[in-house]
Amino acid sequence: MASHVIQGRTVTMPVEVRDATVCSAMYPVRADAARAVIAYSGLDVAEVFPGKAVCVLTFVDYRDGDLDQYHEFGMAFMVRPPGVAGAAGLADLRQAGVFIHWLPVDQRFTLEAGRSIWGFPKELADIELRLSSPYKRCIVRKDGRLVLDMLVKPGVPVPGPGPMTPLDAYTHRDGLTRRVPWSVRARGVRVRPGGALIRLGNHPIAKELSELGLPKRALTSSTVARAEMTFGDAIHP
């Protein structure tokens, strides 16, 4: 069984998250702009409509997991797997993976683990989560500058717990793109069209989001009251 030593602690693979709350919104953005943002990865965006890619913004409260408790915000793009050609439309999205472009966290242990085990682009930031009401809110500040203030409205309940769904996440660090096997089981899911509000700050990431076309209406937003996740070792495609 593979393992990694992080700050003197042994992390055994796969890494498990036993309890987390997840809130996210998917935005249609210009495919040419999204390609420019992730050009360094060598990956291509999936197109939900001709000329439109999907940017995913997610915030997570990790309450119980192998990497301890922490808050996280993610900026990601739906991408085609390496070597797979695609045509615009839902078929492109069905085979898509998720490329993680920016992933700030608020604790140092998960920062080092994420970088060294998987190549996740984690960096320290101030992440304030307000999850006690049906309206879920995330405020991200980096180096004293506001990145964004994001609100996700409550959606319609989706009945029943979902199965453990396999996904592929992609990362890029030190000149190398990696694939990370990732599985999620979601309970207490709510989904709605639109449903997210964003206020951008003056940080460079906020500028990137603005140039992609945010804040505009989200395609969909969702909340997960309890998520379980499993992360396998990174694979070099």
Image: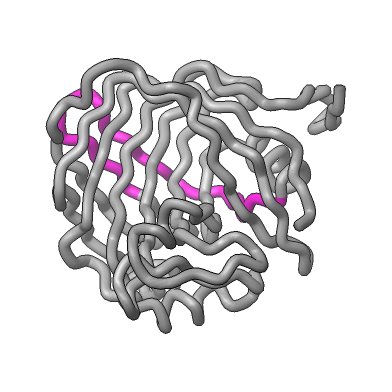
**What residue is rendered at 80% in x and 32% in y?**
6
**What residue is rendered at 82% in x and 23% in y?**
10
Tell me which corner region of the image, top left, top right, bottom left or bottom right, holds residue 22.
top left
Give 83 or 173, whichever is nearer the viewer: 83
Give 63 or 58, whichever is nearer the viewer: 58
Q: Is residue 99 above or below residue 62?
A: below
- Was residue 136 drawn as part of the magenta stretch in this picture? yes
Image position, residue 104 (x, y; %)? 52, 49
Please say whether residue 185 is visible from this viewpoint: yes
**What is the basis of the colouring in this image?**
one colour
- Was residue 172 drawn as part of the magenta stretch in this picture? no
Q: Give the residues in magenta.
A: 119-139
- Left or right of 184? Residue 156 is left
Q: Is residue 99 above or below residue 162?
A: below
**What residue is rendered at 26% in x and 69% in y?**
214
- Left or right of 40? Residue 116 is right
Q: Is residue 17 above or below residue 173?
A: above
**What residue is rendered at 28% in x and 16% in y?**
160
